[in-house]
C-alpha cells in the first residue's frame, strides 16, 4: 500500500472515530451559584441556591471554621488545599460544604456524582482558565469499583504535565477516612484487593486538608436541639427527655437527628419552619 493510500486510510479512520465520539457539551452558563455536572451528557445543570445558612449548622463549630477559612483563601486566590470531610453519617458534612460555598459570593459549586469520578480530569480541563473560581464537590465519595476511579481522581488532583487548574478546588465527603470500600469481593483476589486499597490510600493523601466529624456526644446533641428550638421559637417543658428518646429510637445522635426531632416538634406545635 502506497504512502498516499495509507494516509487516506488513516484519515478515514480518524473521521469515523470522530463521528463515534460524543458531541461536545453546550457552553455552560455559570450565572448561578450551584450546578450539577452530568458526565454522560457533558452538561452543567443549574440548581437552586442552598437555603440552609451556616449559623444553623450546630455542634460543628471547629469544622465550620476550618472549611470556611480554606474557602475564603481560595476565593482570594491564595494557596489552598483540596479538602476531605470524613466521619459518621448525619454530622453535616455535605450541608457544610454547600452552606460554606454560598457564604463566599465569588465561588461557584459544581457537584459531580461519585460514579462519574473517572470524568473528573475532563471536567477540570473544561473549567481550567475560566474567570470563575469553582469548588468541585463529590458527596459520599468511595471507590467501590476498585482502583480505576481512584487513579482518575489522583490524575485530576495532580493535573498531569499542566498541573491542577488554579481556579478549581476539589472537596469531597466520605464516611471513611481513606475512601476505601468496606469490603472487597472475594473473587477479586488478595493481590488485587491490596493494590486497590493502596491506590485509594494514595488518593486520600492528595487531600491536604482533612476535617473529621466524630459522633456527637449527648451534651453536644442536646445543645443542638436547644439551639434549634430557640431559633424557631419552639417550647417544650420536657425538651431534653423527648430529644433523648428520639435519638434512642433512631440509634444515633447527630445534627441531622437533632433537626429531624425539631421538625417533628414543629409539626406537632403547628409551626412552619423556613427550611
Image (cartoon, rainbow, N blue to C red):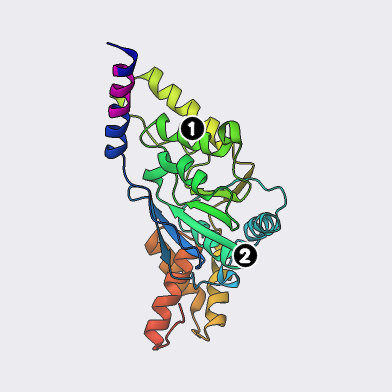
> Which is nearer the eye, 180 or 5?
5
Q: Is residue 8 magenta?
A: yes
Q: Residue sitting at 32 percent across and 30 percent down?
A: 14
Estimate the x, y position of residue 256 in percent, counting from the top left: 46, 64
Position of residue 139 in the picture relative to residue 159 (left or right): left
Q: Is residue 24 magenta?
A: no
For label 2, the SS is loop
Q: Which secondary structure type mostly characterizes the magenta part of the structure?
A: helix
The single residue placed furthest to the top in the displayed view is 1
Task: Note whether residue 91 is visible.
Answer: no
Marks 1 and 2: in contact by CB < 8 Å?
A: no
> Which is nearer the eye, 135 or 7?
7
> Which is nearer the eye, 269 or 116?
116
In the image, is residue 5 above or below residue 217?
above
For label 1, the SS is helix
Estimate the x, y position of residue 29 in percent, counting from the top left: 46, 63
Q: Quadrant of residue 271?
A: bottom left
Estimate the x, y position of residue 209 in percent, counting from the top left: 64, 45
Estimate the x, y position of residue 112 in percent, counting from the top left: 43, 51
Residue that numbered label 1 is attached to: 200
Residue stretch in magenta: 5-12
In the image, is residue 240 above or below residue 157?
below
Position of residue 21 in the picture relative to residue 108 (left or right): left
Which badge, 2 or 1, comes first in the chain's sequence? 2
Q: Residue sitting at 39 percent across and 56 percent down?
A: 26
Q: Residue sitting at 30 percent across and 12 percent down?
A: 2
> Which is nearer the eye, 19 or 101?
19
How far apart marks 2 and 1 lie (CA) works out to 32 Å
In the image, is residue 132 above or below residue 209?
below
Amino acid at each position: 500500500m502506497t504512502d498516499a493510500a495509507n494516509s487516506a486510510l488513516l484519515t478515514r479512520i480518524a473521521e469515523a472515530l470522530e463521528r463515534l465520539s460524543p458531541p461536545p457539551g453546550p457552553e455552560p452558563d455559570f450565572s448561578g451559584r450551584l450546578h450539577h455536572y452530568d458526565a454522560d451528557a457533558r452538561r452543567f445543570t443549574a440548581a437552586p441556591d442552598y437555603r440552609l445558612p451556616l449559623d444553623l449548622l450546630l455542634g460543628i463549630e471547629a469544622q465550620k471554621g476550618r472549611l470556611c477559612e480554606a474557602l475564603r483563601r481560595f476565593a482570594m486566590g491564595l494557596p489552598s488545599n483540596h479538602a476531605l470531610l470524613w466521619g459518621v453519617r448525619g454530622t453535616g458534612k455535605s450541608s457544610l460544604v454547600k452552606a460554606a460555598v454560598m457564604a463566599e459570593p465569588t465561588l461557584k459549586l459544581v457537584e459531580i456524582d461519585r460514579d462519574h469520578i473517572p470524568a473528573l480530569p475532563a471536567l477540570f480541563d473544561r473549567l481550567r482558565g475560566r474567570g470563575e473560581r469553582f469548588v468541585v464537590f463529590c458527596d459520599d465519595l468511595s471507590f467501590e469499583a476498585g482502583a480505576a476511579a481512584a487513579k482518575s481522581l489522583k490524575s485530576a488532583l495532580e493535573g498531569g504535565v499542566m498541573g491542577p487548574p488554579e481556579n478549581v478546588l476539589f472537596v469531597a465527603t466520605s464516611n471513611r477516612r481513606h475512601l476505601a470500600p468496606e469490603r472487597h469481593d472475594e473473587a477479586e483476589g488478595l493481590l488485587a484487593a491490596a493494590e486497590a486499597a493502596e491506590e485509594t490510600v494514595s488518593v486520600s493523601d492528595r487531600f491536604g486538608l482533612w476535617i473529621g466529624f466524630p459522633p456527637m456526644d449527648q451534651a453536644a446533641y442536646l445543645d443542638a436541639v436547644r439551639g434549634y428550638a430557640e431559633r424557631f421559637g419552639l417550647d417544650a417543658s420536657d425538651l431534653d427527655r423527648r430529644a433523648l428518646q428520639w435519638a434512642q429510637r433512631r440509634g444515633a445522635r447527630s445534627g441531622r437527628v437533632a433537626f429531624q426531632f425539631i421538625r417533628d416538634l414543629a409539626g406537632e406545635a403547628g409551626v412552619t419552619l423556613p427550611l
